[in-house]
């Protein structure tokens, strides 16, 4: 008979690793609603590199829509998806209805990447996808402001988090996207 003994620390580490693997397995599962009111099954992004961004129309960082759209256009054929989640939790800077948000994004920035319905990214009503995104082991915690960016690899794992001040077309973001797109 073989006995396997785990000390508390080793068992906790094994359990923590299993929990991380489990969280990444389910990151791209479930449904969200698009700005047009359609249900979107997040599994449609499996096998893609996905940049998830909490967006707002009346923020000083709203011009980040332009480089986000440029990234989408440049890398979409290689497997990049950009997904915007409007959020009104930071200074009330996304007060519009879904129709108003969609019109603003398309008319002002020609956004063609997927835009979802308004959600909470922090607090008791946090959307499920953001609960998972914010548990990224290298940079966990609440979203601090609009236009935080999470990069998800083809395996559905968060591989990078970029705070608001990091522009979407910065060398760090572009390098991270390109690195993940090269992996199969």
Image (cartoon, rainbow, N blue to C red):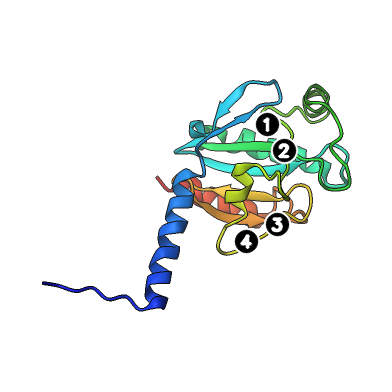
Label 1 secondary element? loop
Position of residue 182 relative to residue 14, above or below, is above
Label 3 secondary element? loop
Q: Disc 3 or 2, which lies upstream in sequence?
A: 2
- Graded by Cα atoms within 10 Å as few (under 14), some (14 to 19) or many (20 or more), the crowding at tag 2 reads some
Position of residue 7 relative to residue 144, above or below, is below
Quarter assignment of residue 92: top right
Could you tell me how far apart the alpha carbons at marks 4 and 3 are, in whole angstroms? 7 Å
Q: Residue under label 4, please give it.
A: 140
Q: Position of residue 120 (x, y in %)?
A: 73, 42
Label 2 secondary element? loop
Q: Residue at x 51, y 35 (%)?
A: 45
Q: Disc 3 or 1, which lies upstream in sequence?
A: 1
Q: Kindly indicate whether the residue at mark 2 contacts the one at mark 1 (C-beta within 8 angstroms).
A: yes
Q: Residue at x 51, y 40 (%)?
A: 28
**129 left or right, relative to 9:** right
In which quadrant will I find the C terminus?
top left
- Graded by Cα atoms within 10 Å as few (under 14), some (14 to 19) or many (20 or more), the crowding at tag 4 reads few
Q: Residue under label 3, please give it.
A: 142
Q: Residue under label 1, please give it.
A: 116
Q: Residue under label 2, please give it.
A: 119
**2 left or right, relative to 18:** left
Please name whichever residue, 31 or 80, is drawn nearer the observer in this view of the structure.
Answer: 31
Position of residue 101 relative to residue 12, above or below, is above
Q: Position of residue 31 (x, y in %)?
A: 56, 31
Could you tell me how far apart the alpha carbons at marks 3 and 1 are, in whole angstroms? 20 Å
- The nearer-to-camera label among 1 and 2 is 2
In which quadrant will I find the N terminus?
bottom left
Q: Residue at x 72, y 54 (%)?
A: 143
**62 left or right, relative to 171:** right
């Amino acid at each position: 008979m073989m006995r396997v003994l785990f000390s508390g620390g080793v068992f906790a580490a094994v359990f923590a690793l299993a929990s991380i693997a489990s969280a990444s397995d389910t990151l791209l599962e479930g449904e969200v609603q698009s700005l047009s009111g359609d249900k979107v099954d997040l599994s449609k992004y499996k096998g893609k590199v996905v940049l998830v961004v909490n967006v707002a129309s009346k923020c000083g960082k709203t011009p980040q829509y332009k480089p986000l759209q440029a990234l989408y256009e440049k890398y979409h054929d290689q497997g990049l998806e950009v997904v915007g989640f409007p959020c009104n939790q930071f200074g009330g800077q996304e007060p519009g209805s879904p129709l108003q948000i969609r019109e603003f994004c398309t008319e002002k920035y020609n956004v063609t990447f997927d835009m979802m319905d308004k959600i909470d990214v922090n607090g008791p009503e946090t959307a499920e996808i953001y609960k998972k995104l914010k548990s990224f082991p290298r940079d966990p915690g609440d979203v601090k402001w609009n236009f935080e960016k999470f990069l998800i690899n083809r395996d559905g794992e968060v591989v990078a988090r970029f705070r608001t001040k990091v522009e979407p077309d910065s060398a760090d973001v572009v390098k991270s996207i390109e690195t993940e797109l090269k992996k199969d």
